[in-house]
Amino acid sequence: MVRWLPLESNPDFVVNLGLKPTWSFVDVFGLDPELLAMLPQPTCALLLLFPTSDKYHEYKTEQEEKVKEHGQEVSPNLFFMKQTIGNACGTVAIIHSIANNTDVLQLDEGFLKKFIDSTKSLSPDEKGERLESDENICEAHAACAQEGQTETPSVDDRVDLHFVAIVHRDGCLYELDGRKLFPINHGKSSEETFLQDAAEVCKEYMKRDPTQLHFTVVALSKTE
């Protein structure tokens, strides 16, 4: 497997790839309604960083088997890609959050817009493979991974944390995890209820692994 440098919870490098500076990834200080209300609006995606313990892998298998058995509805407009690169979960989550909100984000011309436009009709596996060969995004990821580090990271560093994106698309709430076989539809949602609905998904992750403390949530919000 191709491996990239581990990426910290610092996804600002997407500005260099075409995300307008009026939109930013901002810290979420809590999932209670009063703290969510402090986020700049509109907010169109949440990124959850969490420990990949045995409980994650057990629930992942359980969740996938349930979807295989019962099926689920997935919008044909949803952008979902597989993660085929080690340590690339942060970049995959960022792409998921932006690619499913291009109508409001209105990306500038750049590497990210080119990647999204050229891959949106591909299968999830093909999207993942295309990312492997995208030198511009790879270089941007590597540059960001080395910023602010106390020591230079290595592609062989063991990383026990994982990013997923949560977005609203065509009336439903989706969890997008490039390590899973498919997107997970968490039910009906709307622009008005998105934050509360997405926060509930984050809370469920925390409830499943209550002994873990390393959970971080960031939001893609309009800040100007």
Image (cartoon, helix red, strand yellow):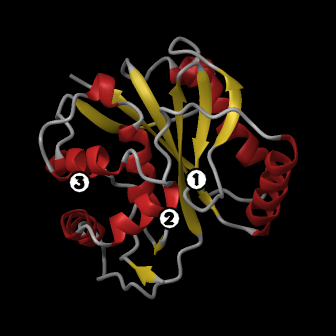
Residue 209, visible in the rendered structure? no
Left or right of residue 174, residue 103 in this image:
left
- The residue sitting at 18% across, 53% down in the picture is 111
Mark 3 / mark 2, whichever is N-terminal:
3
- The residue sitting at 23% across, 67% down in the picture is 147
- The residue sitting at 41% across, 80% down in the picture is 3
Left or right of residue 174, residue 93 in this image:
left
Spatial CA distance of label 1 from label 3 is 20 Å
Question: In this rendering, is residue 221 above or below 71?
Answer: above
Residue 83 numbered tag: 2
User: Could you say which quadrant of the image residue 102 lies in?
Assistant: top left
- Density class for disc 1 (Cα within 10 Å; few <14, some 14-19, many ≥20) is many
Among all residues in the image, which is located at the extreme left?
109
Spatial CA distance of label 3 from label 2 is 19 Å
User: Could you say which quadrant of the image residue 209 lies in?
Assistant: bottom right
- Residue 212 in the image: x percent, y percent? 71, 59
Mark 1 / mark 3, whichever is N-terminal:
3
Residue 189 numbered tag: none
| Three-letter code for the amino acid on which mark 3 is drawn | Phe
Badge 1 marks a residue whose secondary structure is loop
Left or right of residue 23, residue 111 in this image:
left
Could you say which is closer to the camera, residue 172 or residue 121? Answer: 121
| Three-letter code for the amino acid on which mark 2 is drawn | Gln
